[in-house]
Image (cartoon, rainbow, N blue to C red):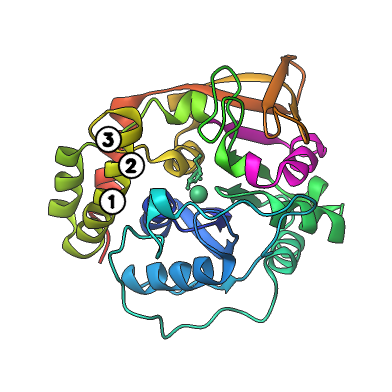
Amino acid sequence: MQKIILDTDPGIDDAIAICYALNHPQLEVLALTTIYGNVATELATQNALRLCELNKHTVPVATGASLPLKIKPNPVADFVHGANGFGQIELPAPSLEPTSFSAAEMIVDTINKYPEEVTLVAVGPLTNLAIALELDPEIAQKVKEVVVMGGAFHRNGNVSEHAEANIWNDPHAAQQVFTADWPLVVHGLDVTYQISFSADYLEKIAAKSHNVGGFLREAAKFYSEFYKSQHNFDGCCPHDQLALTYLCHPEWYSLESGSLDVVTEGEAIGKTTIQSNENSNKSIATKVNREALLKEYTEVVSRAA
Ligand code: BDR
Ligand code: CA
C-alpha cells in the first residue's frame, strides 16, 4: 500500500480523483486536505467530507488556506464546476466533521510520522504545500515524492494564454513547491488534455457502480457542457486523475526531467517552464497510455460500495 495525502479543491475532476483514491487497493489515503480554487475552501472541505461518505470511507479531512500567499484571490471556477462544485448535483450534507488541524499542520505531522513513506499529491492551488514547507522545511527530505496536477509547459494555458488554473491561483506557492529540494512530478495540461471522459464512458462508470459512478456521471454533465461550449468537444478532461493514476502506474507515462519555474507577476503570471536536465529530481509528464488509464479507472470504481 502507498500512503498518500491528497490536497484538493473538489471540484468535479477532483471528485473523479478522490473516488479513485478511496477505492484503489494500492492506495492508503491518510488524509484529504482542502484548498480554494474550484470552490471556496470551506465548501471544498464539505465536499471532501461528502465524497468520503459517498464512498463509505472515513479519512481525516483538514481545512486549508482560504487565500493565496501574495496575490488577490481569483474568482472561484463556478462556471466550470457549478456553484456547489459538483455541477449542481447535491450530495447530502455530511455528518462527518473536519479535523481541528489545519491542512498544512496535517501535512507536516503526517510526513513526520511516516518518514520517506508518504506521497503528497496536490490537485489544486499549491498554497497548503508552501505553508507546510514554511512550517517545517525538513519535510522536503522526509516526503517520499510530491505529485502535482498543474501547469502548461509546452502548450497554452486554460485560464490565460500562459497559465493553467491551479498555478495561476497561487503562483508564489507554486514557485516554492517547484523549487524546493524534494522529488516532484508535475502533470500539466500537456498530459491531462490527452484524456477525456466521453458521455459513453461515463455511462460505463455508472453501470459499474450505481452510487459512486452514477454520481460522477451526473456531476460531469455540467462540466462537459463547459468543454462543449469552450472547446467544442464531447466529454470532459479528468485533469486531476492523471496525477492519481501516475501513483499506481508510472510505467504508463513518459516524463521529461528538468528544473521548473513559475512566472509570478505581469502579463504571463502563472506561466510554467522547464529547462531540461536529466539529473534533476523534478520532472513533468508528457505522455500517457490512454487506453490503460481508462480501462483501469472503470475497474477501480467498480470496487466502490
Ligand atoms: C485544474 O483546475 C481545476 O479546475 C481542476 O480541478 C484541475 O485541478 C485544471 O486546470
Ligand atoms: Ca482540482
Q: Position of residue 259 (x, y in %)?
A: 76, 23
Disc 3 to disc 1, how far (Cα)?
10 Å
For badge 3, the amino acid type reads Lys
Q: Which residue is at a point 66% across and 81% down the rendered structure image?
A: 100
For badge 2, the amino acid type reads Phe
Q: Is residue 180 magenta?
A: yes
Q: Element under label 3?
A: helix
> Which residue is label 3 attached to?
228
Q: Which residue is at a point 72% across and 36% down the rendered structure image?
A: 183
Which is more toward the observer, 137 or 28? 137
For badge 1, the amino acid type reads Phe
Q: Within 10 angstroms of label 1, few (less than 14), some, or many (20 or more) residues?
A: many
Q: Element under label 2?
A: helix
Asked if disc 1 is less than 8 Å from ligand 1, the answer is: no
Disc 1 to disc 2, how far (Cα)?
7 Å
> Which residue is label 2 attached to?
226
Q: Which residue is at a point 31% across and 38% down the rendered structure image?
A: 236
> Left or right: 200 with respect to 45?
left
> Which residue is label 1 attached to?
222
> Left or right: 7 with respect to 201?
right
Can residue 136 be seen?
Answer: no
Which is more toward the observer, 31 or 74? 74
Report the magenta residues as a range. Answer: 168-188
